[in-house]
Amino acid sequence: MNQTAERPTLLFQRAPVRVADERTFIIKLLVLAALTTGGVALALSSTLWLAGIGTLLLGAMYTHAVELQHQCLHHSAFTRTNLHRLVGIPLGLPLLVAYSHYRVRHLQHHRYLGTPNDAEFFGFDTRQPLTGRVFLRGLFDYPRLFLMLRDVWRAFRGTWTYDIGQIAPRSRRDIIAEYRLIGVLLAAVAAVAALGSHELVTRLWLLPLLVAVPLHFLVELPEHILCDYDTTDVLRNTRSISGSRFSTWFTNGNNLHIEHHAAMNVPINRLGERHAEVAQLAGHMERSYPDFYRKIAREVRRNAARQR
């Protein structure tokens, strides 16, 4: 189906970043900073349950930061383009996500969605049958962190290459520089731990990282799973979730994913203007995240019954 034929004008219409949009994104960054600071204070508490809350809050903020980084990938956060990489790089560091590598892969995902060439940066293949084992493997995808270490090693050796097609020399240089930065930071963290502050590293990064990896998977999962994979029509191959104000904030509008794929450079805070049209036309729409995960649970049970 031709996704531009007989489609509402607003849904696929581009929109430049306005000063008001930039201001909204800066407020989101300030909220992230405040909540992260609170998470640090709680995680360092000598009271176990407060420290546990701090760990969960930091893991949630590390996840939220990657969703803010996603907006930077699309250059839809700031009026000045050069600010996107400057801000986007640190947003991905807690989850060890290299901004420029993520950007190249993610823009290819937008370009090739609905074709065999589609491949996301986070490697869970939503086109495979969803079983309990597949779900758990994606939920606890800690091996991705070790693959990142491989990229860091190759970056320092100067042997890093892009594994899906060709990229511009400048993009390759940017990616190598960012993996080297991650390597330096990991070495610094290891040194801090070796010098006696291992508890600090554990409380403020390692334990929250254990939370952030599965939480990020749960945020990303609804985007395309159980949708129509053999079409380039975003109203069929992508899902939107109406969600609540909280889920829209926490996922940074990732719930409005059809709206995002229809016009990927539109500032995230303005996607809600297009949701009414999507609700009328979308093939895959959910009212809430609980509704979506109930659908996932049913699919896992259905596939388990088929395998008996």
Image (cartoon, rainbow, N blue to C red):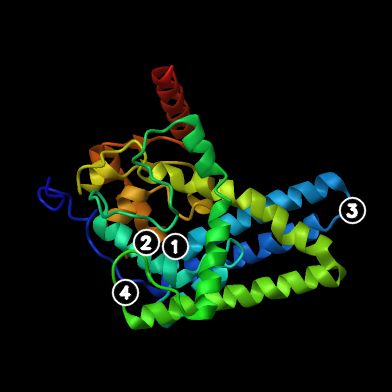
Q: Quadrant of residue 30?
A: bottom right
Pointer 1 residue: 70
Query: In whole angstroms, how far apart are the C-alphas of marks 4 and 2?
Result: 13 Å
What's the amino acid at mark 4? Ile
Q: Earlier in the sequence, mark 4 or mark 2?
A: 2
**Badges 2 and 3: C-beta atoms under 8 Å apart?**
no
Name the image quarter holding the C terminus: top left
Residue 88 visible, this angle: yes
Badge 1 element? helix
Q: Label 4's element?
A: loop
Residue 73 figure quarter: bottom left
Within 10 Å of disc 1 (Cα), the crowding (few <14, some 14-19, many 20+) is many
For marks 2 and 1 on the same chain, the one whose residue lies earlier in the sequence: 1
The amino acid type found where label 3 is placed reads Ser
- Quick check: 260 above or below 233? below
- Separation of disc 2 and disc 3 at Cα? 41 Å
Q: Nearer the viewer, mark 2 or mark 3?
A: 2
One can see residue 245 in this view:
no
- Position in image of residue 235 (x %, y %): 24, 44
- Of marks 4 and 3, the one in the foreground: 4
- Name which residue lies at 38% across and 78% down: 171
**SS for callout 3:** loop
Measured Cα–Cα span from mark 2 to mark 1 = 9 Å
Disc on res. 46: 3
Q: Which residue is mark 2?
A: 106
Q: Nearer the viewer, residue 232 or 302?
A: 302
| Residue corresponding to mark 4 | 167
Q: Secondary structure at mark 2?
A: helix
Q: Which numbered tag is attached to residue 266?
A: none
Q: Which residue: 25% across, 60% down?
A: 111
Query: Would you say the residues marked 2 and 1 are in contact, meaning their CB atoms lie under 8 Å apart?
Result: yes
What residue type is disc 2 on? His
